[in-house]
Image (cartoon, grey):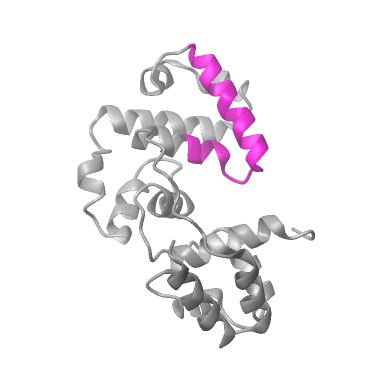
Amino acid sequence: MSRIHHRDFVSISGDISQKLQEAISECGPISKPQPHGLPLPVVMCRTIAGQQLSVQAARTIWSRVLADSQGDPLMQYLPSVEVAQLRTCGLSRAKGRSMKAIAEAFATDQLSENLLKRLPHTERSARLMEIWGVGQWTADMLGIFYFGERDIWPDTDLAVWKTLQRLTSGRRKTTLTAAKFSPQRSLLAKYMWRIADASPNKD
């Protein structure tokens, strides 16, 4: 991210809350992440596996899934593995079932990356959420981190909205506050994640 964007965010946040302005200012510019190069269905499965978990716990569970696949491509491994086996890796039954549904969607050509990346976020989300276990949170994470959408506010992410609410006002909807940063709301979410990680009093 350019320093111009950072200066813009500091300026805009000053009109909203001094606490928000100070927190964003202390973060400094957020750099654009490098592409990870993983296929979409693999990223989807990894996102599902890490939902509502700490970064370390998510990494541990994902490493167990990869180890259990014994080097087979994930989209070949998942259709043949039982949900009960996935649970031994640390996944919940729902997450295991969702990952198998993603593999099935991939096998039936429902996850055409070329098509999905051309769709608006709302339409892409609707298509992705046709897959069992894929909800708005997963669609938003994919939109921000995989498809590189600039203007997504993931209001279903607890850390994002609680951090913004803490830095502004509990009486104002976070969607209204986030709207002031459009068309860069994805960047606002990244600031909130960084601030939440830095907070000594994380919920």
Where is residue 161 shown, x and y percent of the image?
59, 66
Q: In what quadrant of the picture does the N terminus appear?
A: bottom left
Residue 173 drawn above or below residue 145: below
Left or right, 71 with respect to 54, comes to: left
Instruction: Based on the picture, tell me whether residue 47 belongs to the magenta stretch.
Output: yes
Where, by quadrant of the figure, is residue 197 drawn?
bottom right
Q: Nearer the viewer, residue 57 or 98?
A: 57
Where, by quadrant of the figure, is residue 80 drawn?
top left
Where is residue 93 shown, x and y percent of the image?
57, 31
Q: Nearer the viewer, residue 110 or 63?
A: 63
**Residue ID at (52%, 79%):** 177
Where is residue 45 shown, x and y percent of the image?
45, 34
Instruction: Based on the picture, tell me whether residue 91 belongs to the magenta stretch.
Output: no
- Specify the segment rendered in magenta: 46-70
Q: In what quadrant of the picture does the C terminus appear?
A: bottom right
Residue 11 drawn above or below residue 38: below
Residue 35 drawn above or below residue 106: below
**Residue ID at (28%, 57%):** 123
Say whether residue 183 is visible.
yes
Residue 160 drawn above or below residue 127: below
Say whether residue 203 is visible.
no
What count of labels does the image hold? 0
**Residue ID at (50%, 76%):** 7
